[in-house]
Amino acid sequence: MNFAIVGCGRIGQKRARALQACGHRIRALADVVKQRAEHLSIECPEAVPSTDWRCAVSRSDIDAVAVATTNQWLAPVTLAAVRAGKHVIVEKPAGRSVSEIAEVAAASAQAAVCVQVGFNHRYHPAVQKARETVDSGALGSLFVVRGRYGHGGRVGYEKEWRGNPEISGGGELIDQGVHLIDLARWFLGDFTHIEGHVHTYFWKMPVDDNAFLSLRTAAGQTAWLHASSTEWKNLFSLEIYGRHGKLDIQGLGGTYGTERIAFYRMLPEMGPPETTVWEYPAEDQSWQLELADFERSVQGGKSFGPTLADAQAALEIVESIYRTTAE
C-alpha cells in the first residue's frame, strides 16, 4: 500500500522502518516541525515532506495513513483520513477521550474503511505465545491478570508533552496504563467493576505519575494493574493465572530486558510445577507483525484487532479512574 505518515518523531520513525520492512511505500510525510519530516525523508526518498497533514491524508495516491502524533491530534487526523476514504493505523490511545474516539468510529463505519489502534504490545512474541497457550486451553479457565509497567524517567520528563493534560489527556494511566488495560481485556474480556486511583508522587506536573487499578469482569475475574513513571528501572511484567497453571511474561527487549515467557503448568499432585521457558532475544518485531495484521484487516481477513472499540473500552476505564480520583 501507499502510506502517508503524520507525525515524524520517534514513533513515526519506527512506523516508517516497519512499513518499509513490510514492503509498503511511503509517499508523504507530515509533521508540525518540518525538519522532522525532512529528516525522515532521508530514509524515505519517495516521500514528500511537509507541515500540511491535511494535504498528506487527502492525496489521491495514498491508500492508508499512519498517525503518530501527540495525543491531541490523534483523533482529528484519523477523522480527516477516514473521511478521505483512507485506512488508518493510529497510535494508542487513539484520542484523549471516549467522545473523541466515538466521532471517528461513526465516520469509519460510514466510510467502510479499516481503523486499527496501535496497541502493539499484543504483537510481542511472548504475548503472542501467551495468547496461543490460553486459546489452546492449556491454562484452563482464567482467574487473574497481574500487570506492572513503568519506565525509569529522564531529566526534564515533567516538561515534555506527556506532562501537559491539554495535549496528553492525562498522565501515566493514559500513557503506559492503557497498554496494560488493553492486554487485560484481551485475555479476560470486558470489565464491569472498576476501582483504582492515580497519584503524582515525584514529577512536578499536573498529571499522574502512578496509576493503580483493580478491575473485575462480570464473572469475577480480576486484573490488578500498576503503571508507573517512577519505576527508575524500565519494567514490563504480565502474569496470567489459570486453573491449570500460570504464564509469566517479563521484559520487552531493549532497556526493558530480554523478552521471555515462562509457563508453570500445575501437576495433578501439585507441588513444584512443570516449567517451560521461551526467550526472544531478537530485535523487536512487534511493529512489523502489527502491520501485517493491519494488512489482513484491510483485506477483510481475521485479525487480532485492536479496534476503535478496544480503544474506547480502555479509555472508559481511564476516565472512570480519573473521575474517582477527582471526587
Image (spheres, rainbow, N blue to C red):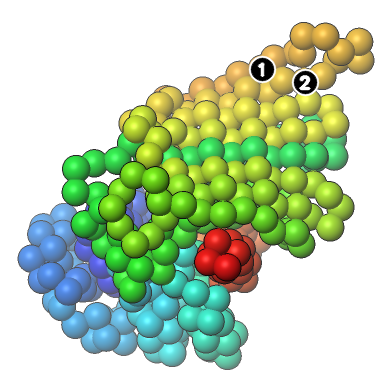
Residue that extends furthest to the right in the rendered view of this protein: 268
106 with respect to 276 (left or right): left
State the count of labels.
2
Residue at image mark 2: 265
Residue furthest front as drawn:
327
| Place of residue 302 in the rendered image (x, y in percent of width and height, measured from the top left) | 65, 61
Q: Earlier in the sequence, mark 1 or mark 2?
A: 2
Which image quarter holds the N terminus? bottom left
Please identify the quadrant where the C terminus is shown.
bottom right
Expressed as whole percent of the image width and height from the top left, the position of residue 195 reads: 67, 55
- The residue nearer to you, when weighing 99 against 325, is 325
| Marker disc for residue 246 | none
Q: Is residue 9 above or below residue 90?
A: above
Residue 131 in view of the camera = no
At 31% from the left edge and 87% from the top edge, which residue is drawn? 58
Q: Is residue 85 visible?
A: yes
Q: Which residue is rendered at x = 32% and y = 71% of the image?
A: 167
Q: Residues within 10 Å of mark 2 (few under 14, many from 20)?
A: many
Query: Which residue corresponds to the image point at 56% horizontal and 54% vertical from the top-left?
Result: 197
**Residue designated by label 1:** 276
Q: Residues within 10 Å of mark 1 (few under 14, many from 20)?
A: few
Please, what is the three-letter code of the amino acid marked with disc 1? Thr
Per the image, label 2 sits on a secondary structure element best described as strand
* Label 1–label 2 contact, CB within 8 A: yes
- The amino acid on which the numbered mark 2 sits, given as a three-letter code, is Arg
Q: Vertical placement of 278 versus 223: above or below?
A: above
Measured in 3D between alpha carbons, the distance from the residue under mark 1 to the one under mark 2, in whole angstroms, is 8 Å
